[in-house]
Image (cartoon, rainbow, N blue to C red):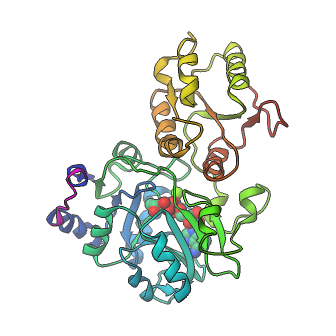
Amino acid sequence: METRIYDFKEDIKQNTIDEKKLFEISKFIKNGGLVAIPTETVYGLGADGLNPNALKKIFIAKNRPQDNPLILHVSDIEEIEKLAYLKIEDKIKLKNLWPGPLTVILKKKNIIPDEVSAGLDTVAIRIPNHRITRKFIEICGCPIAAPSANLSTKPSPTNLRDTLADMSGKIDAIIDGGDCNIGIESTVLDLTTDTPTILRPGFYTEEHLSKYWKNIKYDLSIKNSAATPKSPGQKYKHYAPNADVLVLISDSVDFRTEILRILKNTTKTIGLMVFEDDVKFFEQIDKIEKDNIISMGSKIDLSLMGQKIFSSMRNLDSKNVELIIINGVKDEGYGLSIMNRLKKSASGNIKVLGGENEDSFDI
Ligand code: TXA
Ligand code: MG
């Protein structure tokens, strides 16, 4: 199958929308096909959310386990009425947070196909903060089911190149909306329980959401990896590049010493994802290619790290790096969301320097 690419970067720059082009692309969705869509978090792999045959294709293209439910993307909060039960007090709160990087779990209505909810009595819904994609959903005239547009177990794609790498030849079209601003997937918030519960951390943190819902809490599995997660997708291997990943947590001096020690003891090709203050230091070290050192920006503002985290792993994979060493961050605020992804990318290979070692990594 030829995967067609539709470039909307100029529309984004000029604040315009080529509705004719979107109408043309919407025919793929109406005919039960697959279209990758940009959002502010990551690229999604979209299909008509009410068409079981189209939904089945998502699972095949991604090689996704059948019991992992999908998120329905809508363009307007009023569309939820048809799909799920949304309390008026929650609706008022959500108007402050949407469009945005938040998915809510609601009791589903009968219209929801089993392929979306994977046998649960709930459904995940979100309004993405991406002008082109919201207009596309509106033109399609149906909710768009969209998981992240990666092959299962791989890091989510946040640009055209990474979406193509996993989906070229498997889907009808890709809407190129440039790089995603946020870079990690939406916060998933369960509103079906007495206490609203964060099932997957994201850009909207507990602190931020607790302005709207008192007593909000994290699902136990987020802070304790031994607990079974309530979100089916959280239990699978995830966000893993081809290279091994080691996450090092420390102040920067220990971090440098530890990397020098690793370099001495390994023949592997190393890639580094480090904060800006460390880049110059490592560029002077012969054993690491300059090209394999990627800056995560400032340690104080983690937004750039979030934005680049998946694309940097994929970038290092494309250079055949064998071990990616990443500077981990504190498990708090947005750092907790970033570490949630990194722990999975590293399959538990995390080392806390100068503290208690969670799991040492053997080189
Ligand atoms: O930012 C995002 O959320 C991206 C963009 C494309 O919108 N989408 C995304 O979808 O990350 P996906 O399928 O990769 O992750 C959806 C997560 C999974 O962990 C899934 O198990 C969970 O949401 N989920 C979906 N429906 C659920 C439900 N009814 N109850 C609990 N968890 C659910
Ligand atoms: Mg995903």
Q: Residue furthest top?
A: 286
Percent x, y of residue 6 = 22, 53
Task: Give the residue displayed 58% in from the left and 80% down from the top.
Answer: 122
**Quadrant position of residue 53:** bottom left
Residue 315: percent from the left, percent from the top? 45, 34
Q: Which residues are magenta?
A: 13-19
Residue in the image at 20% along x and 53% along y: 14
Is residue 32 placed above or below 249 in the rendered structure? below
User: Is 32 left or right of 309, judged from the image as shown?
Assistant: left
User: Regarding ligand 1, which quadrant of the image does it lie in?
Assistant: bottom right
Image vertical order of residue 139 relative to residue 262, above or below:
below
Q: Is residue 199 visible?
A: yes
**Residue 315 magenta:** no
Using residue 307 as the reference point, say whether residue 187 is left or right of it. right
Taking the spot 22% from the left edge, 57% from the top edge, the residue there is 15
Give percent across and percent down for residue 31: 26, 72
- Image label count: 0
230 is higher (above) or lower (below) than 360: below
Visible in this render: residue 2?
Answer: no
Viewed as shown, does residue 138 lie left or right of 302? left
**Residue closest to the eye, 103 or 4:** 103
Q: Residue at x 28, y 62 (%)?
A: 132
Q: Residue pushed farthest left?
A: 20
Q: The N terminus lies in which quarter of the figure?
A: bottom left
Which residue appears farthest toward the right when viewing the image? 356
Residue 179 horizontal/vertical position (percent): 37, 47
Residue 69, by quadrant, is: bottom right
Asked if the stretch drawn in magenta spans residue 18, the answer is yes
